[in-house]
Every structure is written in structure tokens, then in C-alpha cells.
């Protein structure tokens, strides 16, 4: 009797999916369910990239700031969630209006339906979550310019403006049906929207904050301020690399014909090429196979292929990654030469590689893939036309100029009104103690029975 009951339950388990969708001969409900699941998985992967950013920033900075890095990342992601729900999503993807080409307007304090409507590819809830995770990534990139010298209060204020206004405006222009989208700007998963935006905000911050104590000598030469844990940094790159498949492949927002696999394939090639190129160029130039440059090159390859992963053939993905790996090596040296203190290399990894990746579409995109995605046209090599390269250049310049100007404005006002750099004493003691009252590594940084740094 028991065996018969188990057999019956097994048959019902197998037949249940068929029975559930039997009333839908077109399979639309099943497609929507699969798409929803895929976008939700992609959201989780992108959200977990915050763990990568915690390890990246903590590993690349000094031990006395590690707890601060971890705590402020979680807090600002929490605040970003509320700001994106209240304002950001409405500006990026809000309903149509007379000014919709410039800014979205609607869906503020987003109140989605409980479930998807008939004909939808996925519920609006999972799309909101997916886009929120992108906003959080761009914000974490911006924090690279604040590292080791900014007050906690400055993170709070800038989060409000960046996630509420600055980032979603650019997202609307390119992804939300805005004027750059109408021009055919190709940025599949955010080389410009996410990475360049975050990098330029970081640039504004590091210029206004000025370099960390001891970074540069009076003659302009740079001192290396080593991060406290290179293993953390390497692990962060692996976590970000895995999360990137939610970032890029997830941007298909559909299971469909499996195109997400092609996007993931190109993403892997771009990352691999970037890491190899950066290691080899550092080895050739300095005589040492520098680990930091190799890690930066891997991330730069990922950043660069983010715009073009759905628009180019595999050989082009390799070329894009190789160029990104070499570019990031020389970019790091350039910013040090002009005395810009960029502890997390956000300007090089996310800024320069983001620019290159966006422009690369104008060179390598194919007409076939542009038609498949439904954005823009083929690039110079495939079509012989400069048109798409011009559109890509336009999107980089306009979006970049807006983010840079807006970030300088917000941070400049913050600097005048509240100040956003800690005092010299606080910076020397470290942000763990000065901002939070406790060390991230108490056993290593305290003398026994004392509250002072060892």
C-alpha cells in the first residue's frame, strides 16, 4: 500500500507542471515563469557583487579602515534601496510624459501589482530588483574615490543624490527610452550607465577630497600605500567575476532561445583576455608579474565587454578584453602621474575601460546582432559606417559630462556646507575607530588593555 502511495505521488509530481500549464497552449505562462526566475537569479548574482566590493575595497586599503569599508557598503546599499524605490526608479523608468526623452516621470514610491499581467514577459517587481542591484553597483564604484578619507555622513548624503537623481537620469537616457536610446546608443549592460557613471563620481570625490596623507611627495612622486590583504582583493575579483554573469547575461531578461549563453560566453572571453594582457604588459614593462595589475586587468576586461557582450563576435570580445588589460595598466600610471589618488583604481578599471568598452561597439558590433538586440546598427568593421561609433562617442561624452558636473556640484556644496573629509588625526587613527568607535581587527590593532592603536 505504501509503495502504491509513493508511486502515485511521484506521478503527480511529474505531471503537475504539465497540468498547471495545460490551459495555456501557447506556453506564455511557462515562458513568463522562466523569465521571472532567470531575472530573479540574475538580481541575486548582481546583489552579491556587493560582497565583492567589500573585499575589493577592504583588501586594497589599510587594516585600520577595514571595518568602516564593510559597514558603510552595507548601509549605503540599504539607503540606496529606499532612494531607488522612492525616486530613482521613477526617474529611470517612469511613465511617459512630455519630457520623457530627458527624464522619466512616474512610478515614484513604486507600488507594483502583486503579479504580472497577461502578456508580460516578467513581473515588474523582479525588473525593479534587477535594476536596483545595478544602481548599487554604480554607487559602490563611486566609493572608490572616497576611500580612507571621507566622513561617514558624506556617504549618506551622496547616496541620496546619486541614486535618487544622477544615476537614474543616465539610465533613463540609455535604457529607459530616453534621447540616447532614440539615437541608438548601445550599452547592453552598463559600461557607461553603471561603470563610467560610478567612476566619474569617484573622480569628482577624489579631486575634491585631495590625496591621502603620505600618498605624494613634494616633488610629485607617488608613494605606494599597499592594501592590507591581497588575498581579499583576489577573492573579490572572483566574486565580482561570478556576479558579472548576472550583470551581463541577466540583461537579456529572458530565457528565450538561449541568447544569454552567447552573452555569457563573450563575457568570459573578455575577462580572460583582460587579465592575461594586464599581467603580460606589467611583466614586460616592470620585470615583475604584478598581481594587482592582473586583477585590475581582469576587471577591466569585464567592464569593457559589458557594453558589447551582446553585439560582437567572440574574436572581437577577446580583442576588447586585450585592449582593456593594456589600457588599465597605463591608466593607473597616468592618474598617479597627475597626482590623483585613486586607492581602488576606479578611474582606470571602471572609467577608462568603460569608455573603451562603449566605443568598441562602434567598431566591432555586427549588424546581425544589433538587429537581434534591437538597438542601433553594426559598427565600422562590419558595415563600413562611422554612424554607430559617433552615437557611442556621443553617449560617452554627454553621459560622462552630466555625471561629472552633477557630482562636482553635489560634492562641492557638501564640502562647503558640512565638509566631507575627516581630520588629519582621524585619518591617521583610521576610520574604524574615528567614525565607528571600534576596529575591524581589534586583536591586531589594539594593545592589550588599551584603546589606542598598536
Image (cartoon, rainbow, N blue to C red):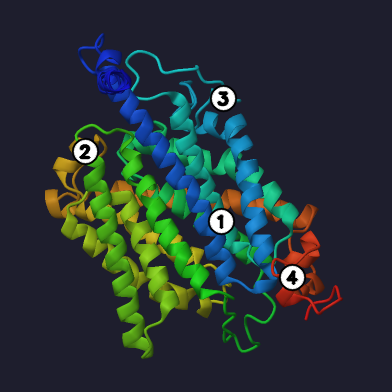
Determine whether, in the image, residue 356 is placed left or right of residue 379.
right
Residue 257 seen in the current view: yes
CA distance separating discs 4 and 1: 28 Å
Question: Regarding mark 4 in the picture, which secondary structure is present there?
Answer: helix
Of mark 3 and mark 2, the one earlier in the sequence is 3
Disc sitting over residue 258 in the figure:
2
Question: Regarding mark 3 in the picture, which secondary structure is present there?
Answer: loop
Characterize the local packing of mark 2: few (<14), some (14-19) or many (20 or more) Cα atoms within 10 angstroms.
Answer: few
Residue at 24%, 37% in the rendered image: 373
CA distance separating discs 2 and 4: 49 Å
CA distance separating discs 1 and 3: 25 Å
Name the image quarter holding the C terminus.
bottom right
Determine whether, in the image, residue 381 is placed left or right of residue 289.
left
Viewer-nearest residue: 274 or 100: 274
Disc sitting over residue 110 in the figure:
3
Characterize the local packing of mark 1: few (<14), some (14-19) or many (20 or more) Cα atoms within 10 angstroms.
Answer: many
Q: Quadrant of residue 445?
A: bottom right
Pointer 1: what residue?
Answer: 142
Give how far across and how far down residue 269 sits, in percent: 25, 60
Disc sitting over residue 442 in the figure:
4
Q: Quadrant of residue 146?
A: bottom right
Characterize the local packing of mark 4: few (<14), some (14-19) or many (20 or more) Cα atoms within 10 angstroms.
Answer: some
Amino acid at each position: 500500500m505504501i509503495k502504491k502511495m509513493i508511486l502515485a505521488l511521484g506521478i503527480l509530481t511529474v505531471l503537475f507542471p504539465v497540468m498547471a500549464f495545460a490551459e495555456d497552449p501557447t506556453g506564455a505562462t511557462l515562458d513568463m515563469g522562466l523569465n521571472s526566475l532567470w531575472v530573479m537569479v540574475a538580481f541575486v548574482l548582481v546583489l552579491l557583487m556587493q560582497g565583492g566590493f567589500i573585499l575589493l575595497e577592504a583588501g586594497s586599503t589599510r587594516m585600520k579602515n577595514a571595518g568602516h569599508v564593510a559597514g558603510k557598503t552595507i548601509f549605503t546599499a540599504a539607503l540606496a534601496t529606499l532612494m531607488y524605490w522612492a525616486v530613482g526608479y521613477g526617474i529611470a523608468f517612469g511613465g511617459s510624459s512630455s519630457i520623457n526623452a530627458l527624464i522619466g516621470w512616474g512610478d515614484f514610491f513604486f507600488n507594483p501589482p502583486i503579479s504580472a499581467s497577461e502578456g508580460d514577459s516578467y513581473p515588474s517587481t523582479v525588473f525593479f530588483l534587477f535594476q536596483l542591484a545595478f544602481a548599487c553597483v554604480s554607487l559602490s564604484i563611486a566609493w572608490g574615490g572616497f576611500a580612507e578619507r571621507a566622513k561617514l555622513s558624506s556617504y549618506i548624503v551622496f547616496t541620496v543624490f546619486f541614486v535618487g537623481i544622477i544615476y537614474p537620469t543616465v539610465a533613463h537616457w540609455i535604457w529607459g527610452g530616453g534621447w540616447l536610446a532614440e539615437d541608438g546608443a548601445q550599452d547592453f549592460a552598463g559600461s557607461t550607465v553603471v561603470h563610467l557613471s560610478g567612476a566619474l563620481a569617484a573622480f569628482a570625490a577624489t579631486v575634491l577630497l585631495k590625496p591621502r596623507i603620505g600618498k605624494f611627495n613634494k616633488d610629485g612622486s607617488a608613494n605606494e600605500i599597499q592594501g592590507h590583504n591581497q588575498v581579499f582583493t583576489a577573492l573579490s575579483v572572483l566574486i565580482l567575476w561570478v556576479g558579472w554573469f548576472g550583470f551581463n547575461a541577466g540583461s537579456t531578461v529572458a530565457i528565450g532561445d538561449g541568447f544569454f549563453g552567447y552573452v555569457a560566453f563573450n563575457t568570459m572571453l573578455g575577462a580572460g583576455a583582460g587579465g592575461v594582457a594586464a599581467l603580460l604588459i606589467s611583466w614586460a614593462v616592470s620585470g615583475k608579474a604584478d598581481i594587482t595589475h592582473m586583477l585590475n586587468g581582469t576587471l577591466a576586461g569585464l567592464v569593457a565587454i559589458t557594453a558589447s557582450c551582446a553585439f560582437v563576435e567572440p574574436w572581437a570580445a577577446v580583442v576588447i578584453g586585450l585592449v582593456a588589460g593594456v589600457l588599465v595598466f597605463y591608466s593607473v600610471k597616468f592618474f598617479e602621474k597627475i597626482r590623483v589618488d585613486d586607492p581602488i583604481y576606479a578611474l582606470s578599471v571602471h572609467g577608462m575601460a568603460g569608455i573603451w568598452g562603449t566605443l568598441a561597439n562602434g567598431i566591432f558590433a555586427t549588424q546581425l546582432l544589433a538587429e537581434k538586440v534591437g538597438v542601433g546598427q553594426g559598427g565600422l568593421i562590419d558595415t563600413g559606417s562611422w554612424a554607430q561609433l559617433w552615437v557611442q562617442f556621443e553617449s560617452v561624452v554627454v553621459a560622462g559630462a552630466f555625471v561629472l558636473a552633477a557630482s562636482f556640484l553635489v560634492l562641492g556644496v557638501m564640502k562647503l556646507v558640512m565638509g566631507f573629509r575627516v581630520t588629519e588625526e582621524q585619518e591617521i587613527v583610521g576610520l574604524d575607530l574615528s567614525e565607528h568607535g571600534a576596529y575591524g581587527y581589534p586583536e591586531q590593532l589594539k594593545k592589550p588593555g588599551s584603546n589606542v592603536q598598536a
